[in-house]
Amino acid sequence: MLFHSRVKCFCRTVAVIIVLTTVCPFFVPGVAAKKGRDAETGKHFLWSVASERNTIYLLGSVHILKKNSYPLPQAIENIYGCCKTVVFETDLDGMNDPDSQKMIMKRGLYPQGHTLSGNVSRETHALLKTRLEASGLSIAQFDRFKPWFVAMTITGLELQRLGFDPDLGIDRYFYEKAKQEKRDMVFLETNNFQLNLMASLNKRHQDSFLRGVLKELDVIESLASEMLDAWNTGNGEKLDSILKKSNAEDPEIYDRFFVQRNRKWITHIKRLMKQDNDVLIIVGAGHLVGKESVIDLLIKKGYSVMQR
């Protein structure tokens, strides 16, 4: 009974982290978003693309913040106000239903006879053991969990310890507003798709993913400050540089979590350009920077993209 209670608790944590970090636990800046804004570029983390029928706005989201990150800049609020349709990566409420919780539990646990210790490298196991013991936890508590599940759980626990709140993410903020105001909401992906991004990773990639998360947790506070500074000033190059370092250990995971999804999203965006109303698309800030980002792909297709 204790084991199942613990699993349910972890599932709730994982559900939040899956949806709000979009399988990338490194986007977690959380100091006041107002400080230092426009100091470098005079821009926001916001772009626009004009089509023949409407304007598409692309806002980079910081998925987890603190209370002192609000209010957001008025320019961003104004763009939201003029868009009848708001697009999110996925339905942020979707992971809370009982069926989703059961699915997370099913996909996150090894069947009887299989364990975490038997499916990760010695290096990853040692890093995890050290991390958990430093937090007063036992590695035995996690031995039935798959590496991706463990990565999401310890990320969630660490963010909570540092005082971050997923309910204060930019996408969650606008999601709640759009829901209250009965705006037309569109989702680029299903919750099941996002869950499968991690749950279907092969053994090597799961090991690499967990190891990468464990290493990032040691510098998460300093990375947070750098990332938020880049977001505050609309400095995509700076954020791209940080993300390249974070994802250097396994470029295949970066390709899976970012590049492949960006390419699929372009098809959705082209459809949205055929609407008569302006559209605000809110996705993780990492999807809007660097080569093969949504912005880069739109430019390559000949669209004129302007940073606001």
Image (cartoon, helix red, strand yellow):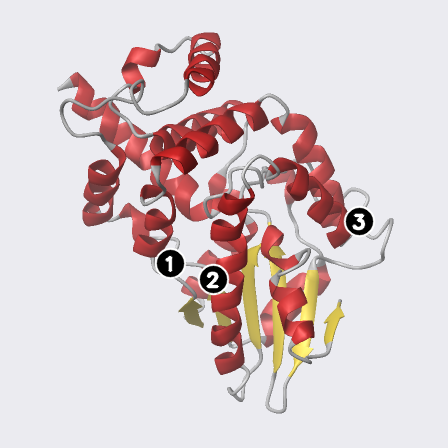
* Label disc, if present, on residue 91 of the rendered structure: 1
Q: Quadrant of the C terminus?
A: bottom right
Q: Position of residue 143 (x, y in %)?
A: 28, 19
Cβ atoms under marks 1 and 3 closer than 8 Å: no
What type is the residue that disc 2 sits on?
Answer: Phe
Q: Position of residue 186 (x, y in %)?
A: 42, 70
Pointer 3 residue: 37
Tell which tag, 1 or 3, sits nearer the viewer.
1
Q: Is residue 46 left or right of residue 183?
A: right
What type is the residue that disc 3 sits on?
Answer: Arg
Relative to 41, is 146 above or below?
A: above
Cβ atoms under marks 2 and 1 closer than 8 Å: yes
Q: Quadrant of the N terminus?
A: top left
Tell me if mark 3 has few (under 14), some (14-19) or many (20+) residues whose alpha carbon lies within 10 angstroms of its own: some
Pointer 2 residue: 88
Q: Position of residue 134 (x, y in %)?
A: 48, 9
Whether residue 130 appears in this view of the structure is yes
Q: Residue at x 63, y 69 (%)?
A: 297
Residue at disc 3, secondary structure:
loop
Q: Is residue 53 left or right of residue 134?
A: right
Q: Quadrant of residue 129?
A: top left
Residue at disc 1, secondary structure:
loop
Q: Residue at x 29, y 12 (%)?
A: 140
Cβ atoms under marks 3 and 2 closer than 8 Å: no
